[in-house]
């Protein structure tokens, strides 16, 4: 019996509507894509299906794993101009590896920009990819990814998805070393797949043709009826990828943690994805799934010339909720984020707003009309590339505060509603909790991170450090300046950089400014930090940059996989504590006047503390004060963790460091029962 016999008229009608909508989405994808992006999209099914020496992804092994189910059907539906050359009717492998190939994300929507990726779900069964074949096929995918980026400037990511696990509501590991969204929040990821899916080749996801009024029980019954037909004469046309269920409370928390972490790389996307989680909780889970809303619109508008756009539906749902729940400032921030994301003025390619995209123009014009925005407000967003760094950072920091406030609201509501089902310090979620704590702002000791990786990438490579005697603040300025060709040794003119718009950071101490630069990896990688000669600073350019590199070597960029789970929630210093004596005092000063310290907490946050000992006349009293300072402010209990930050210390500074270590060791010997930083951090996760 054919699987068609199991489908009623509603499913057949929805199948046709989905097919028309998918074709329209692909047309939109191709219309918005760069030539390289289109080339990769057109070639991928063939590269997965064949193993030929002239094609990217070739494996020089016999019986290399390959093949896309129903490849011949895909080839027939592709226009000749879009087919890879020399491919007509390639031989099929005995059993193709790829059962279904689909794109997830912004492809084929107004959210597609010049910086968008091709994110493929490559669905397989373990029987067709045992361990050795899995290793080989992963090599093939990696080679195709490299070809796409190097030859066509397109980022193509392939996620191997185990269908046997997916239909049970699980997502296969095989995605990399770190925990993934699919592992911590599989139902949220499945909903996103069904909402944004562009079907490419292979078997069609069964849920996409399942009627809205159909129950989960009946869906699973149909899936079981179709499953035995597999590989009899021909495999079924449809595949069970699971039924999107309401996630459990712990998964709601996990998803919000994941998005708070993910916002490091995509802040504008992160806020648009975390708000629907808050809405679901605020509506007591009565709000329909967004994938159901998209399906309803596809049923209602089976137009072959106009695709139902899941991105527009998502944004408008988020804005509608925010209009009821957010403050005017936060609502405005959310609206700005939506437009900037659609315009493509954020993320990996901050330069590219496709002004000739009529669909983008129509939706943005409609939004600003509905929001009663003056045209000047949109014009300012269109000019985003020319915003000052200060303006971008202010907006980014406000967005980060909003995102974390939404996360905290979600966390608090979950803990209130489900105290026995939610655990924010669950071992699986610990890395995400650590990332959130590591990005917190507001504590005086905290060395802030930039709002996102995007804001770091958008800074120009020239940075200047300056001290203002009137405000007693150190400021980092961003500038784009090159000396004249006829005067290559010209000094950077003060008026070229010392403006409020160019100020990107300020601190009370030069060591904290150095810690901020190191924390955000603003040294090396093409960045240049200078202390201009005409600055009021007592810190010279050479001295500051040498200290900066010592600091970076003592506290290098941290991978969260390196954190110790046994000390994860300890606020006390972990690892090296870098010390700087008299950093802002003339170097010939022989008496110890100030001490700065930089260290990391158990969850990876970088902190800076300092003390002034200039009021004490007796040197021994100073060392006792500094020992207490290290114990109480840093929570350090091992003299061997202390390291002198001066790259070329004078004899009196070297002697002071040794004296401090001795005094500190003596203090610890006298107070063996002191609190050793073993208490948990007093921060609500």
Image (cartoon, grey):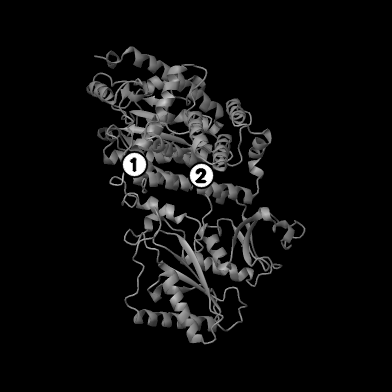
Q: Which mark is residue 267?
A: 2
Q: Is residue 199 above or below residue 516?
A: above
Task: Name the residue nearer the viewer: 460 or 253.
Answer: 253
Task: Name the residue nearer the viewer: 292 or 62.
Answer: 292
Residue 431: image location, x then y, percent: 37, 52
Spatial CA span between label 1 and label 2: 21 Å
Pointer 2 local density, CA inside 10 Å: few below 14, some 14–19, many at least 20:
many
**SS category of the residue bearing label 2:** helix
> Which of marks 2 and 1 precedes in the sequence?
1
Residue 248: image location, x then y, percent: 31, 39
In which quarter of the view is residue 255 placed?
top left
Q: Quadrant of the image for the N terminus?
A: top left
Determine whether, in the image, residue 174 is placed left or right of residue 154. Answer: left
In which quarter of the view is residue 167 placed?
top left
Q: Which residue is mark 1?
A: 251
> Residue at 41% across / 79% down in the picture?
664
Q: Is residue 561 visible?
A: yes
**SS category of the residue bearing label 1:** helix
């Amino acid at each position: 019996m054919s699987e068609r016999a199991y489908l009623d008229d509603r499913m057949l009608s929805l199948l046709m509507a989905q097919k028309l909508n998918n074709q329209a989405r692909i047309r939109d994808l191709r219309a918005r894509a760069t030539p390289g992006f289109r080339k990769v999209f057109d070639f991928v099914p063939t590269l997965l299906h064949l193993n030929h020496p002239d094609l990217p992804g070739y494996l020089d092994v016999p019986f290399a794993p390959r093949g896309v189910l129903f490849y011949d059907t895909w080839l027939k539906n592709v226009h000749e101009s879009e087919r890879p050359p020399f491919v007509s009717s390639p031989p099929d492998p005995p059993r193709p590896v790829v059962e279904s190939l689909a794109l997830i994300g912004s492809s084929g929507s107004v959210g597609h920009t010049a910086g968008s990726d091709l994110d493929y779900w490559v669905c397989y069964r373990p029987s067709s990819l045992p361990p050795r074949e899995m290793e080989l096929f992963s090599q093939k995918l990696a080679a195709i990814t490299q070809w796409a980026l190097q030859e066509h400037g397109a980022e193509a990511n392939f996620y191997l998805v185990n269908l046997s696990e997916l239909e049970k509501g699980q997502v296969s590991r095989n995605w990399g070393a770190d925990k993934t969204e699919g592992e911590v929040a599989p139902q949220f990821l499945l909903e996103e797949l069904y909402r944004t899916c562009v079907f490419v080749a292979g078997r069609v996801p069964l849920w996409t043709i399942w009627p809205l009024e159909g129950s989960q029980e009946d869906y699973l019954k149909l899936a079981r009826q179709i499953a035995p037909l597999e590989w009899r004469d021909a495999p079924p046309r449809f595949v069970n990828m699971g039924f999107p269920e309401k996630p459990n409370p712990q998964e709601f928390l996990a998803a919000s943690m994941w998005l708070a972490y993910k916002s490091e790389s995509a802040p504008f996307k992160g806020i648009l994805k975390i708000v629907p989680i808050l809405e679901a909780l605020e509506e007591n889970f009565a709000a329909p799934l967004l994938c159901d809303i998209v399906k309803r619109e596809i049923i209602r508008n089976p137009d072959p010339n106009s695709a139902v756009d899941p991105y527009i539906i998502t944004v408008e749902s988020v804005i509608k909720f925010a209009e009821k729940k957010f403050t005017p400032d936060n609502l405005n921030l959310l609206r700005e984020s939506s437009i900037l994301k659609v315009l493509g003025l954020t993320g990996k390619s901050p330069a590219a707003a496709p002004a000739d995209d009529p669909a983008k123009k129509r939706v943005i014009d409609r939004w600003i009309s509905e929001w009663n925005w003056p045209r000047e407000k949109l014009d300012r967003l269109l000019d985003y590339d020319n915003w000052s760094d200060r303006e971008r950072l202010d907006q980014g920091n406000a967005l980060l505060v909003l995102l974390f406030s939404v996360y905290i609201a979600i966390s608090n509501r979950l803990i209130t509603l489900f105290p026995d089902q939610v655990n924010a310090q669950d071992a699986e979620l610990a890395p995400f909790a650590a990332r959130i704590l590591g990005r917190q702002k507001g504590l005086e000791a905290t060395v802030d991170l930039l709002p996102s990786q995007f804001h770091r990438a958008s800074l120009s490579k020239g940075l200047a450090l300056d001290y203002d005697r009137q405000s007693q603040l150190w400021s980092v300025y961003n500038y784009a300046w090159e000396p004249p060709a006829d005067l290559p040794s010209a000094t950077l003119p003060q008026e070229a950089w010392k403006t409020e718009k160019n100020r990107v950071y300020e601190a009370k101490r030069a060591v904290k400014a150095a810690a901020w630069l190191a924390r955000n990896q603003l040294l090396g990688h093409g960045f240049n930090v200078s202390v201009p000669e005409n600055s009021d600073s007592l810190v010279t350019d050479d001295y500051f940059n040498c200290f900066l590199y010592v600091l970076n070597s003592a506290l290098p960029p941290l991978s969260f996989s390196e954190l110790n789970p046994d000390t994860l929630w300890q606020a006390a210093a972990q690892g090296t504590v870098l010390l700087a004596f008299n950093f802002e005092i003339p170097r010939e000063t022989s008496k110890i006047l100030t001490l700065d310290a930089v260290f990391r907490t158990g969850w990876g946050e970088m902190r800076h503390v300092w003390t002034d000992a200039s009021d004490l006349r007796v040197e021994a009293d100073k060392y006792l004060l500094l020992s207490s300072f290290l114990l109480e402010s840093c929570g350090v209990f091992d003299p061997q963790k202390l390291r002198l930050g001066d790259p070329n210390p004078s004899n009196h500074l070297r002697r002071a460091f040794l004296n401090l270590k001795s005094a500190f060791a003596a203090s610890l010997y006298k107070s063996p029962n002191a609190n050793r930083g073993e208490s948990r951090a007093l921060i609500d996760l």
